[in-house]
Image: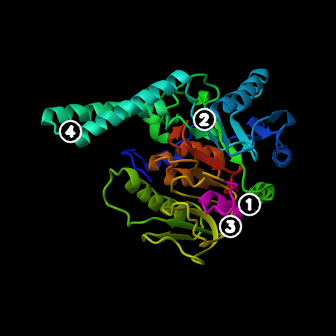
């Protein structure tokens, strides 16, 4: 996983800051794919389980592959959602739920023929400059000039190739109320409590952002089980143990960034869970992750870092919630044999998890201590806990689970 510098001031009091009201069932819009029979059937099943009005079900006709083009996204997902919201202005929709059969990823916009020609020209120029640097005997000033030219060409190529214009469908559609914004990179999330003191610097207000969750998984049976287990755990209470898998001891230093910040946050999440939940908490602070058989009766989990290699250490309780901080752990939910954590955790029995569809950088993940503090509070739903702890939108992260789920409601 690549790492970018990020310093976020996180105060314990943030965990008790109440910036929104608990999400209600009539505030949820279900988005199902009528080109996939299971998608519509699962939407109706969830609708009945959560007593969501039938008018809050929107079916679209789109690909049921895990990837879609930007054109498909705009015409087959964004357009019908905007039309629905315009036609139902009396309904207060705060959350979109994407069902099994809706694509995971949206690609960058395609290049025009003129842009392709320009790209080819830039690539040719870059090869020439690179050849000059490698094969010519140059003065120091001339070498520096070529190096600066090479850096400029690399920057232009990066912008034109749009490597950072793709995103998770979920993260992009959270901004469906906004018709125009930059697609390159991420957009700060106005719900993230870490940006509470930076409102003037945010592009979006809270009322311009919708919560988004995905009820999806490897098979329709697993998706149905996610729904059933969430309702069961909410009614009966989430029982079991909490497991937190850090890599290093908690440092004394206060101002942390990148990996250090997230590792320390896992420590603090373990401490909060121990104080608030009443669940037995197991904290591992060694480089080796929990191994097979070491995490029985798991109800809560957060750890890192095993890239694309799920470690089967757990037996999951009904309604279990957890996520593994590593790149691309939600790059597929369907590919047979894949060992990415989201897919494998769902197959093994978790009801809710979080992961990226592509490289998110570490700061793309929800802050562990914030996510679990809201979830443990019992007032906030899964979707709210996620959005309050998530720094960025129009990016790579996905929440998998019932957005209305409150495992500690009672």
Cα–Cα gap, marks 1 and 2:
30 Å
Instruction: Work out whether mark 1 precedes mark 2 in sequence or the reverse, and give the earlier one.
Output: 2
If the image is split into quadrants, where does the C terminus sit?
bottom right
Taking the image as shown, residue 355 lies to the left or right of residue 63, namely: left
- Circle on res. 136: 4
Instruction: Work out whether mark 1 precedes mark 4 in sequence or the reverse, and give the earlier one.
Output: 4
Query: Label 2 near label 3: C-beta < 8 Å?
Result: no
Q: What element carries label 1?
A: helix
Residue 344: within the magenta? yes
Residue bearing mark 2: 172
Instruction: Work out whether mark 4 precedes mark 3 in sequence or the reverse, and give the earlier one.
Output: 4
Taking the image as shown, residue 273 lies to the left or right of residue 130, namely: right
Question: Label 2: few (<14), some or many (≥20) within 10 Å?
Answer: many
- Circle on res. 233: 1
If the image is split into quadrants, where does the N terminus sit?
bottom left
The stretch in magenta equals 333-347
Residue bearing mark 3: 239
């Amino acid at each position: 996983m690549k790492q970018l510098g990020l310093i976020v001031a996180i105060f314990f009091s943030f965990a008790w800051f109440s910036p929104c009201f608990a999400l209600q069932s009539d505030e949820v819009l279900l988005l199902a794919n009528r080109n996939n029979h299971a998608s519509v059937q699962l939407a109706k099943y969830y609708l009945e389980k959560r007593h969501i009005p039938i008018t809050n079900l929107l079916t679209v006709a789109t690909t049921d592959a895990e990837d879609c083009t930007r054109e498909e996204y705009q015409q087959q997902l964004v357009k019908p959602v905007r039309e629905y919201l315009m036609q139902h202005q009396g309904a207060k929709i705060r959350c979109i739920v994407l069902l099994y059969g809706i694509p995971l990823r949206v690609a960058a916009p395609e290049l025009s023929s003129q842009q392709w020609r320009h790209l080819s020209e830039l690539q040719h120029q870059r090869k020439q400059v690179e050849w000059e640097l490698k094969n010519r005997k140059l003065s120091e000033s001339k070498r520096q000039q070529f190096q600066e030219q090479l850096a400029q060409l690399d920057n232009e190529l990066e912008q034109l190739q749009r490597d950072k214009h793709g995103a998770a469908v979920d993260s992009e559609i959270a901004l469906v109320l906004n018709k125009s914004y930059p697609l390159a990179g991420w957009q700060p999330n106005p719900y993230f409590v870490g940006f509470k003191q930076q409102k003037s610097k945010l592009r979006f207000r809270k009322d311009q952002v919708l919560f988004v969750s995905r009820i999806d998984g490897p098979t329709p049976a697993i998706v149905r089980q996610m729904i059933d287990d969430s309702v069961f755990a909410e009614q009966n209470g989430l029982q079991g143990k909490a497991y937190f898998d850090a890599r290093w001891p908690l440092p004394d230093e206060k101002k942390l960034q990148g990996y250090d910040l997230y590792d320390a946050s896992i420590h603090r999440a373990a401490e909060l869970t121990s104080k608030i939940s009443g669940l037995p908490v197991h904290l591992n602070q060694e480089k080796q992750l929990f191994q097979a058989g070491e995490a029985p009766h798991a109800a809560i989990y957060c750890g890192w870092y095993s890239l694309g290699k799920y470690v089967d250490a757990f037996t999951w309780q009904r309604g279990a919630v957890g996520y593994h901080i590593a790149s691309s752990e939600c790059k597929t939910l369907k590919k047979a044999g894949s060992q990415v954590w989201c897919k494998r955790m769902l197959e093994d029995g978790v009801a809710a998890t979080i992961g990226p569809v592509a490289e998110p950088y570490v700061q793309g993940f929800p802050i562990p201590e914030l996510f679990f503090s809201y979830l443990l509070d019992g007032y906030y739903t899964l979707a709210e806990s996620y959005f309050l702890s998530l720094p960025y939108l129009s990016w790579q992260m996905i929440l998998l689970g019932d957005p209305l789920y409150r495992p500690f409601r009672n």
